């Protein structure tokens, strides 16, 4: 992603973000909220760039967000991998 300005969300490892809310709407209008360890919140929707590895939100579901990021093998981008961030279960930590 050379030449593309990085957003604050692209400065985090995905493991540093916690999914806190999902607003479910028809079609691709759903969005989600993640927060960092300091409690700063960010809104995600399909197509949002996220994470240090060039990830992009592929889908927002009722209980999770699916992120697709390049998987680099031997110095080349040869395939994509999916990373899922899930909502914590009610009444406890997940």
Image (spheres, helix red, strand yellow):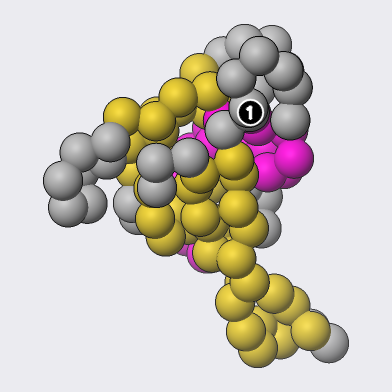
Which residue sits at x=22%, y=51%?
28
Describe the element under mark 1 as helix, strand or loop.
loop
- In this rendering, is residue 24 above or below 52? above
The front one of 42 and 58 is 58
- Residue most extreme to the right: 74
Give the percent coordinates (x, y) of residue 61.
Answer: 40, 47
Give the percent coordinates (x, y) of residue 79.
Answer: 62, 84
Query: Would residue 66 appear left or right of 51 to someone viewing this image?
Result: left
Give the percent coordinates (x, y) of residue 48.
Answer: 39, 48
Which residue sits at x=57%, y=14%?
40
Give the quadrant of the C terminus.
top right
Query: Mark 1 sits on what residue?
Result: 88
- In this rendering, is residue 39 above or below 50? above
Which residue sits at x=60%, y=66%?
82
- Residue 47 showing in the rendered view: yes
Residue 29: image quadrant is top left
The front one of 91 and 20 is 91
- Residue 14 located within the stretch drawn in magenta: yes
- In this rendering, is residue 7 above or below 54? above
- Residue 54 showing in the rendered view: no
The front one of 91 and 28 is 91
Residue 31: image quadrant is top left
Give the percent coordinates (x, y) of residue 88.
Answer: 63, 28
- In this rendering, is residue 58 above or below 88? below
Query: Would residue 4 appear left or right of 34 to someone viewing this image?
Result: left
Q: Which residues are magenta?
A: 1-19
- Residue most extreme to the left: 26
Query: Would residue 92 appear left or right of 51 to someone viewing this image?
Result: right
Residue 80: image quadrant is bottom right
- Residue most extreme to the front: 91
Which residue sits at x=65%, y=88%?
78
């Amino acid at each position: 992603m050379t030449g593309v300005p990085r957003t604050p969300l692209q400065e985090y490892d995905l493991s540093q973000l916690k999914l806190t809310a999902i607003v479910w709407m028809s079609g691709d209008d759903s969005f989600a909220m993640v927060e960092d360890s300091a409690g700063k919140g960010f809104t995600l929707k399909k197509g949002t760039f996220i994470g240090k590895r060039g990830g992009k939100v592929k889908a927002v579901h009722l209980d999770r967000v699916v992120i697709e990021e390049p998987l680099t093998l031997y110095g080349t981008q040869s395939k994509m991998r999916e990373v899922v961030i899930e909502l914590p279960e009610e009444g406890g930590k997940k």
